[in-house]
Image: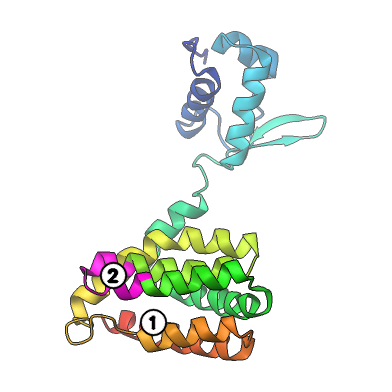
Amino acid sequence: MPLDAVRPSPLVEQAADRLRAQITGGQWPVGTKLPGETTLAKELGVGRSTVREALRALAGAGLVRARQGAGVFVTATEPAEDWPARLRRAAVTDVYEVRLGVEVHAAALAAARRTPEDTAALRTALAGRRTAAAGDDAAFVDADIALHAAVVTAAHNPVLADLFTEFIPTLRRGLIEMLDLVGLRTTDPNTGDDTHEALVEAITRGDAEAASTVLREELEGTLGLLRRA
C-alpha cells in the first residue's frame, strides 16, 4: 500500500508516525520485512537519513528490529510501554516496595560519601520539612520528598538518583491521598520529624548502619499505612 508524502517540519517525527500507523494498523504484520530505505524515502517524500532516524525511533519503541545484512523487520504491532508510563500506572505500594530497596541502600552510601555540602543540604531540607508542617498536605509531602531526595543525592550514585526521580510523581500522589485518608497530621502536623532528624544525624556522622535502619523502619511504617489506606 503506497504511503502519502509527509509534510516537512518535523520530518523525522512525521515519518515515524506514518510508519507506526502502518504497523499498528496491520499493513505490515509481525515478521514482515519493511521496504528498503530508498523505497520508504521515496514514498514518504523525505531523505534516507530521515527514514533511518524514524526507523531508529520505531526500534526504540520495540516495533521493528534491524537484522544485519537482512533488513528491518516488524517485531510488534503495539509499542512497548516505557518505564515512566509503567510507573504512572503502578500501585503506590508496589513503587514503595522498590523505593525501600533504593533508598535504604542510598542512605548507607550517603553516610559513607557525604560531603559538607551534602550535610548542609540535608539540614536545610529537614528545616524545610519542619516549616512545611504548618502548610497543607501537598506542601508537607513535597518537603518530605525533598529531604529524601537530598539523601539520595548524597549517595553520589546517578543511577539511584535517576530511579528516585522517576518514583516521585507516583509517591507524591499516593502520600497525599494517604494523609487525607488517615488524617495522620491531624494531631501531629510534623509527623515523623524525630525519625527524619535521626536519619540526617546518622548520615552526618557517617553511621551507615544507623542511617539504613532508621530509614528502613520509617519507610516500612509508611508502607504499612499505605496498604491500609
Choose the circle earlier in sequence order: 1 or 2: 2
Above or below, 10 against 183 in this view is: above
Give the residue drawn at x 69%, y 13%: 38
Tell me if residue 86 can be seen: yes
Residue 165 appears at what percent x and percent y? 49, 59
Q: Which quadrant of the rendered structure holds the C terminus?
A: bottom left
Q: Nearer the viewer, residue 103 or 114?
A: 114
Q: Nearer the viewer, residue 59 or 219?
A: 219
The span picked out in magenta is 128-141
Above or below, 4 against 158 in this view is: above
Disc 2: CA contacts within 10 A as few (<14), some (14-19) or many (>=20): many
Give the residue drawn at x 72%, y 34%: 66
Write down the quadrant of residue 76 in the picture: top right
Residue 27 appears at what percent x and percent y? 51, 27
Disc 2 residue type (three-letter) = Ala
Give the residue drawn at x 44%, y 59%: 87
Residue 95 appears at what percent x and percent y? 45, 70
- Circle 1/circle 2 CB separation < 8 Å: no
Tag count in the figure?
2
Labelled disc at residue 223: 1
- The residue beneath circle 2 is 132
